Each structure stands twice: as C-alpha cells, then as structure tokens.
Image (cartoon, rainbow, N blue to C red):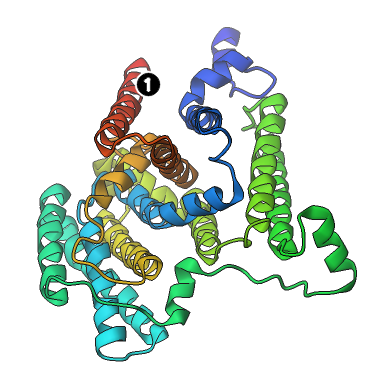
Amino acid sequence: MAIAQEERLPATAETVSPLDFIRRHMREYGILIALVVIMGFFQIATDGVLLKPVNITNVVLQNSYIVIMAVGMLLVIVAGHIDLSVGSVMGFIGAVAAVLMVSYGYDYFTTSLVCLALGAVIGAAQGYWVAYYRIPSFIVTLAGMLVFKGLSLGLLGGKSIGPFPREFQMLASGFIPDLFGEGGIYTQLRMQFGGETFNLFSLFLGVATAAVLFWMGMRSRAQAQKYGRLEEPFAFFAAKQAIIAFAIIYLSWSMSAFRGLPNVLIVMALLIGIYSFVTSRTTLGRRIYALGGNENAARLSGINTQRLIFLTFVNMGLLAALAGLVFAARLNTATPKAGLGFELDVIAAVFIGGASMSGGIGTVVGAVVGAFIMGVMNNGMSILGVGIDWQQGIKGLVLLAAVIFDVYNKNKA
C-alpha cells in the first residue's frame, strides 16, 4: 500500500530529474532552442547582417501580420478546427480600407473600426456553419478563401488602390517617439548608449518588459510551489528567465539604436499578453483546450461547445482584419494579390510552435515563436540569395519535421 501511495505522489522540482523534465517538456523547450539555433546559424552565415538593428526592425515589420493571425489561428486549431480563409480575408479587408479611405474619403479611424467589425462578421458567418451545422471547417473556410479572393478582385477592379493617409501608415511604419525629451541627462545617456538618435524611451520599455516578465515568472513559480505543482528545476527556470531577459533587452537596444520600437510591435506585445492571459488564466481559455481535447466530454461536462467554436472563428476574423489593416498600411496600397498564400505561413507557424493537429495542445508564445522561426528563415535565406523555390521547399520540410515530432511525442506518450 505504501508503494502505491508513493507512486501517486505528484512530481516536484525535487523529485523530477533534469532529464525527465526535458523529456516531458521537449515540445516547449524544443522550439525555443530551434529559434536560437536558426538565428545563430543565419547570423554566422550572413556575416552578422541578420542581427543588425535595421534588419531586426525589418523582421518584426515583415512578420507582424503573420504573428497577429497566428495568435487567432492558435485558438482555432486548439479547438480542433482550421481556417484556410485568413489570407483572403486579410486581403479583402485591405481592399475595403482602400476603397473607404481613398475612393470615398473616410477618415482612418472610422475606416479601421468598420474593417474590424467586418472581419468579426466574416468570422461569425463562417463560424456559424461550423459550430451550429457541423459543416467541416476545412470546407467552410476553403469556400471562404475562394469567395474573398473573388470579392477582393471585384472590389479593386483588378488594380491597386493607394496611397493611404499618413496617420494610417503610422500603424505599420511608425515608431514610438522618445518621450524622455532632449537636453540634460537624457542627451548624455543617449550619447553613452548609441548616439544622438538613440531612442532611450524604447530601451526603457524593453528593460521594463523584461523586469515585468521576470516578476511574473517568479510569482508563477512561487504559486506552483505553494500548491505542490512545481516541476521545473530552478536551474532551468533561471536559465530560461536569463535568456528571455537578455533577448528582450538586446533586441530593444538594437532597435533603439535605429529608430526605436515600431508601433506594430507594441500592438503585437499587447495581443500576446492578452491572449496568453486568456488561454492560461481564464475559464474561457481552459474550456477551449477542453473542447479541443475531447469535444464530447466537454459537452457532457456542461460546456457550450457550439458557442465556443463560434467565438473562436469570430476572434479569427477580427484578428485577420487587424492583420489586413497592418499589411495595407505597410504597403501603403491595396492590391488584388494581398494575402496570397499567407494562410499557409500562419498555419505552419502554429504547428511549428508546438500545437497539435488533433487540438487541445498549443500556446500563444509557441505560435509566436513559430512565426518568428518562419520569419527568420525567410529573411536569412533572402539575405543569402536563396531562390524562392528552395525557400518554399525548406519551409515545407521544417513544417513536416514539426508534425512528425508531434506525432512521435503523442505515440510515445
């Protein structure tokens, strides 16, 4: 009897060996290690070009809309579904924004609200058929992809429309101003860090973010220890926190030496923070994971699974619309081919980030890391002059490897 009781005791940081902990959390740590290795490889291969301030800023801007949509796609995939229409919806929303602002003279704020609302309506229309009529999401969103491609072509008349008002362009091409001002100690600090144009306020935001994340990590660890749920050895925790803090501060310093933190990076950071909280700390988030893990069991436990599925698609439509606004603002024009193939990059980012094909598994941070793995690979291969044919093939192999890894871990468990 004593042996049986010992076997039922929960694993803790004192009882779990480092090797066992790595084996249990290979999915979580594997993608972080993969990102570091890929960045290190391209940093060496490009003779240091990858991590230059201007290129880091370009990587963030080039992948902002993929990251935004990956956050929404994660919830859809965790719920056990998929959305193939996000690229076309993104392009359609950009076309609507162009027509409203350029052709009809609407201001950027009203246009943005209309476009976000339209994106939510599109998500609701698709989610309705999936949630309440049980039509497979693959079919519904495939139809949506074709529909919104056609609507974009019709709305734009087969031509590009632009440019947009300067205020709207700032969403994707603007940077946070240095609120510390000029003169006195601030000018001296700028000269010490990187020169007269160094954005000291952006560096301050980066350091503050690293400090807040460290405090939150310590708080979560203390709570887990209090309730006997602490598994992570302190050495792993300390190393992870140190790497995260170093990465945030280094990237903030690098971008501050160029023009500062981009506006869209703040938008992404807010989305990542909000959705990470929702998925890990709220009843709604836990119910979405339960839905993806076993829909029948979730329904029998009293969860309104139809409404949850519906809401995940509404959310996906909203974030696809936001990504469409960001993409249009960055290009400063709306084109009929906007968003072409982006749904594949978004889905690949979520799967590479550790989400399971069968649903119920995945994290927001993992999806974001997956998006940046794809982004760094695209950027690094472009710098090296690798052809688009090879780029697509390599990205396909990386996605296949991520799925094989997921299936291997599932069968092993």
Q: Position of residue 35 (x, y in %)?
A: 50, 33
* Of residues 269 and 2, the one drawn nearer to the viewer in this rendering: 269
Residue corresponding to mark 1: 409
* Of residues 45 and 140, the one drawn nearer to the viewer in this rendering: 45
Quarter of the image with the C terminus is top left
Left or right: 80 with respect to 353? Answer: left
Residue ID at (34%, 74%): 116
In the rendered image, which quarter is residue 245 located in?
Answer: top right
Q: Position of residue 74 (x, y in %)?
A: 36, 48
Residue ID at (32%, 67%): 321
Quarter of the image with the N terminus is top right
Residue 282 seen in render? no
Q: Residue furthest right?
A: 184
Vertical side of 98 occupied by 375: above or below: above
Residue ID at (84%, 55%): 192
Left or right: 114 with respect to 4? Answer: left
Vertical side of 401 occupied by 63: above or below: below
Q: Position of residue 128 (x, y in %)?
A: 17, 63
